[in-house]
Amino acid sequence: MLLKALIIAGAKSLEGGIAMMLGGRMGPAPDGFQGWGRMTLSGALPLPGFTDPGFRLQVADWGSFSAAGESTVLEGLNATGTGPVKVVLVYYDFPGLTLTGGALVNNLDLVVEVNPGGRRVFGNQPENATKPRPDSINPVEQVLLSAPVAGSAIRIIVNATSLPSSIFDQATTQRWAVAVVGHFAGTLRSPLNPAWAVERGMTPPRPSNPPQEPDVPPPSEPDAPLPPPRPGRPSRRRPPLPITAH
């Protein structure tokens, strides 16, 4: 999930490019023609010589919810005012039933607060939306702060809005990951941030049910030599019929 969040966070919008199916120019990402945009490594990772010196990355991995109404708050970041900040939430939903009314089974929502001012931006909503509302359709949510004021505190909230997973999923919690890229200072102060946790002698969370290694049978004894081929049998094909002149 974290890798998926990083790839989406680093994608560049193809706005202004030509879409052959549209016969015109594309709008801002995301949409059904360009997805989240063109994947760029320099947009996801702070690579010296390829990204701006003020570009940074912070993550929260192995987030977990077990009941609706739970939430996690990620704090510690402040905008530097030198460029945009992008926050991406990714989670894997459980399989749903066909012919149901909604696309999601479990619904998590991303909210980013910018202080001072208390401005709230919901995932997959325009930054200046007049009637902002949570996204209840997609298991990927993104917030783009195009030009946050220098010194603004960026507060990230992940909410478990609805977790009606079916009975056979109850033993499995809803996992999620967040990636933050852009121009900011500070560190996400959360045990879900591996860098912050390790600095304080904490163990970052790990999956409760790690994948099991497949059972590999012990090496067998060398194969016995193959028996010699059986002697050939006489041909049973019938002889050709004589050709007679008429």
Image (tube, grey):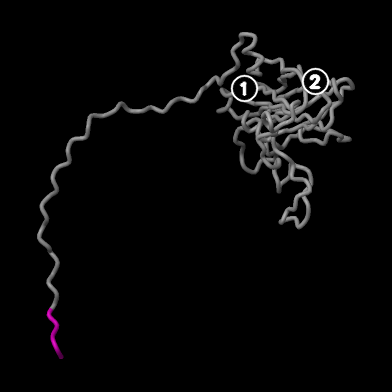
**Closer to the camera, 159 or 192?**
192
Q: Is residue 244 magenta?
A: yes
Using the image, tell me which numbered label, if any, was put on residue 78: 2
Q: Write the start and end of the magenta stretch as one range.
A: 242-246
Q: Residue 194 placed where, x, y %?
A: 63, 18
Q: Image quadrant of residue 176?
A: top right
Local SS, label 1 = strand
Quadrant (top left/top right/bottom left/bottom right) for the N terminus: top right
Examine the residues drawn in magenta and state their main secondary structure.
Answer: loop
Q: Residue 87 placed where, x, y %?
A: 74, 29
Amino acid type at circle 2 is Asn
Quadrant (top left/top right/bottom left/bottom right) for the C terminus: bottom left
Q: Looking at the image, is 63 positioned above or below residue 6?
A: above
Q: Earlier in the sequence, mark 1 or mark 2?
A: 1
Instruction: Tell me what residue is drawn at x 75 percent, y 55 percent.
Output: 22
Sort mark 1 into few (<14), some (14-19) or many (20+) by Cα contacts within 10 Å.
many
Q: Image quadrant of residue 77?
A: top right
Report the mark closest to the observer, 1 or 2: 2
Instruction: Tell me what residue is drawn at x 70 percent, y 25 percent.
Output: 57
Mark 1 touches mark 2? (CB < 8 Å): no
Residue indicated by mark 1: 62
List the single residue furthest toward the front: 49
